Amino acid sequence: MKAMILAAGRGERMRPLTDSCPKPLLEVGGTPLIVWHLRRLAAAGVTDVVINHAWLGAMIEERLGDGRSYGVNIRYSAEETALETAGGIAKALPLLGDEPFAVINGDIFTDYDFAALTVAAQNLGENLGHLVMVRKADYPTGRDLAIDANGKARLCEEGDQAMTFAGVAVYRPAFFADIAAGQAAALLPSFMRCMERSLLRAELFSGLWLDVGTVERLNQADGWAVGQR
């Protein structure tokens, strides 16, 4: 299985740190955020990795190179301007192949076992995707989601345990069939189309997870990293 790490965002909420450094290269525990992912992927046996980039993308390529230092093989999908999440993935599809692949947000910190994504890919059945979710955090996140009795993702309804997409998933290429290469597109509309057809599986992850979207949470992740080495 191949994996893609999303690294094209500008990181507006992290300024001024991201004025001169792409957000995935900001360090947590002395190691760039994205390198934590690369090492965990390598440990899980996922060694073919695609990274998209836009803002200060040359710095990402210079820092990570071909990935050999981290036990992986990296190919890059450069975007002149960020295409948003779904658009960036759609553009990279030629590098990802015809089989299900994993996608990981470059700006999260987690101890999720990426080996589980290989299992999820092998057991997708008719589903077009598999989402990892976490319980809703005490800071602003994306649209509230839930998991139904059949293990499928859906929009959160009254009485549900509110959950947040963790930025870790497996998709079939067909999940992005409606998005043209080079077209900017957010991910939520694709989620909703897939959920309407009941073709999006989900799991709840209760381990360590943080959306590193602010300087304060970057500092929080830095403290957590001590126990992750």
Image (cartoon, rainbow, N blue to C red):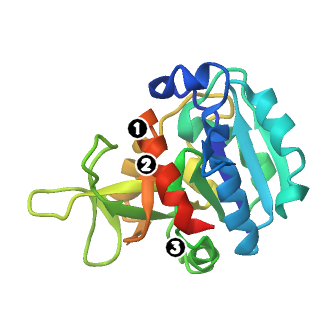
Helix, strand or loop at mark 1: helix
Nearest the eye: 121 or 19: 19
Q: Which mark is residue 220?
A: 2
Discs 2, 1 touching: Cβ within 8 Å: yes
Q: Is residue 180 left or right of residue 162?
A: right
Q: Which quarter of the rendering shows the C terminus?
A: bottom right
Q: Position of residue 50 (x, y in %)?
A: 76, 50
The residue wearing badge 1 is: 216
Q: Specify whether residue 76 is in view.
A: yes
| Position above or below: 45 against 215 | below
Residue type at the position of mark 2: Gln
Residue type at the position of mark 3: Glu
Work out whether mark 3 precedes mark 1 in sequence or the reverse, and give the earlier one.
Answer: 3
Residue type at the position of mark 1: Glu
Q: Quadrant of residue 13?
A: top left
| Label 2, label 1: how far apart the Cα atoms are | 6 Å
Discs 2, 3 touching: Cβ within 8 Å: no
What residue is at 64 percent from the left and 34 percent from the top?
180
Q: Quadrant of residue 117?
A: bottom right
- Mark nearer the viewer, 3 or 1: 1
What residue is at 47 percent from the left and 43 percent from the top?
219
| Position above or below: 134 against 119 | above
Q: Which mark is residue 120?
A: none
Q: Position of residue 201 (x, y in %)?
A: 42, 69
| Residue, far left | 159
Q: Which quarter of the rendering shows the N terminus?
A: bottom right
Q: Which mark is residue 126?
A: 3
What residue is at 38 percent from the left and 60 percent from the top?
197
Work out whether mark 2 precedes mark 3 in sequence or the reverse, and give the earlier one.
Answer: 3
Q: Is residue 175 left or right of residue 143?
A: right
